[in-house]
Image (spheres, helix red, strand yellow):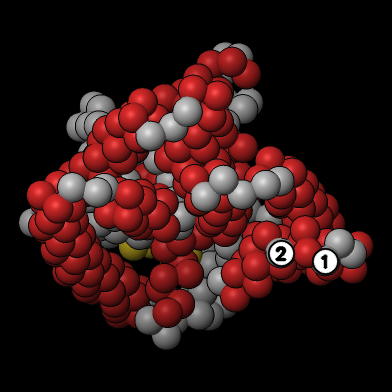
Amino acid sequence: MVSCAVAFVLSVKSESCKSWKRYFSVILLLMVAFSTYQGYICLFVTAVAAWCILGWLREETNVWKNCGICALLCLGGIILYFAFNLIIINIVGGATYLSENYIGWSNESSVWKALFLALANIVRVTFGITIRGEIIYGGVVIRTISLGFLVWGIYYLIKKQPKKRRLVFAFFCGALMCSPFVLYVILGTYKTHGRVLLALPLAGAMELWLIFTFVQSHFWKRLCLIAGTYLLFLNARNMNWLFYETKIVYDYDAETADQIMYDVMREGMDYHIKPIVFIGCRTMGPLPIDKAGTIGGSLFSWDDGNNYRMRDFIETRGYMLLSPSQENFQEALKESEKMPFWPAKGSVKETEDIIIVHLSRPTAKWYSVNNVTP
């Protein structure tokens, strides 16, 4: 976060001090931020978009030039991060199931379809639209602020901006609304991965600030303040519900992990010398609030049974597990065909090489995420 913030300050101040050393330091800082968390790409772009729209409203000079410099610096940080990422993956390997879930360019029938779906998802999240039962968590707050900013932008465009400045003003307003979702376009994905929306609160705050600052009427300003206060209350309530739900899910996962390991040790199976293979997944019962994306997702049902995540979580409970090989997975699949589902008796079985926990029948997604050949 600090690297991204310092890089932003150095970027917008670049006009007063042109130096390749300054530019290179910005690229390095952005590389550090992006490699720590890819969502900082959206944060940097959103900050630049907000800075540009303010500069345009204040009729500052060289807004376009400074915007271009920031764009090139951001692109440099992304390229440097991607280069280091490729080197690391070639040396130590990587989790391919993660990249397959996030990068959508090759998952659709055409590049244009992937781009269309990514852009459509920006609209869906911006206005909190529910599609096929998939809700946008906190969608009421996001939708209200987006609609309010859209109304303000149209009014300000028509009433306050000269005709020759309207097109650029509309562009910067659109850029501010779309910038938190830039990773959707970069990755070509329509799946609402909440982790890339780190910049959404910044964009929303900036939109509210613009409305409050440039609304002149006392009546409308007070009305906006009342509405903004209520939206902040809703947002705080949503966060508390989220933490409450997460605690319920964590307790469920912790209890499941402890029960599985209790069954393993009760049967005298030594997980220190034999890897545990989880076949299928265990579905959690209904939660007290709506499930949205990864919010409320149990690690024992994630991706229909992600062995990597289940194993990592069990290790946080104090059990150090071994990683199974592809041969171990194939053996476990064969042995599990006649085993009942956990926690029934006989659902935990030991062979000469592995320990098997049969949670459910494996799905096509289970095979894919665990890199197992059917």
For the point 89% across and 64% down, which residue is it?
19
Binning the other alpha carbons within 10 Å of mark 2 as few (below 14), some (14 to 19) or many (20 upward) gives few
Residue 168 location (% of width, % of height): 55, 31
Residue 324 location (% of width, % of height): 58, 61
Label for residue 13? 2
Count how many numbered circles sit on residues in the image.
Answer: 2
Instruction: State whether residue 220 appears in this view.
Output: yes
Seen in the picture, residue 69 relative to 253 is either above or below; the reply is: above
Label for residue 68? none
Q: Nearer the viewer, residue 30 or 297?
A: 30
- Residue type at the position of mark 2: Lys
Q: Quadrant of residue 9?
A: bottom right
Q: Quadrant of the C terminus?
A: top right
Seen in the picture, residue 139 relative to 21 is either above or below; the reply is: above
User: In the image, is 286 to the left or to the right of 358?
Assistant: left
- Residue type at the position of mark 1: Cys
Q: Quadrant of residue 32?
A: bottom right
Q: Quadrant of the N terminus?
A: bottom right
Q: Is disc 1 in contact with disc 2, using a CB cutoff of under 8 Å? A: yes
Looking at the image, the residue that sits furthest to the right is 20
Label for residue 17? 1
User: In the image, is 231 to the left or to the right of 173?
Assistant: left
Residue at mark 1 to residue at mark 2: CA–CA distance? 7 Å
Binning the other alpha carbons within 10 Å of mark 1 as few (below 14), some (14 to 19) or many (20 upward) gives few
User: In the image, is 58 to the left or to the right of 72?
Assistant: left
Look at the numbered disc 2 and give the secondary structure of its residue. Answer: loop
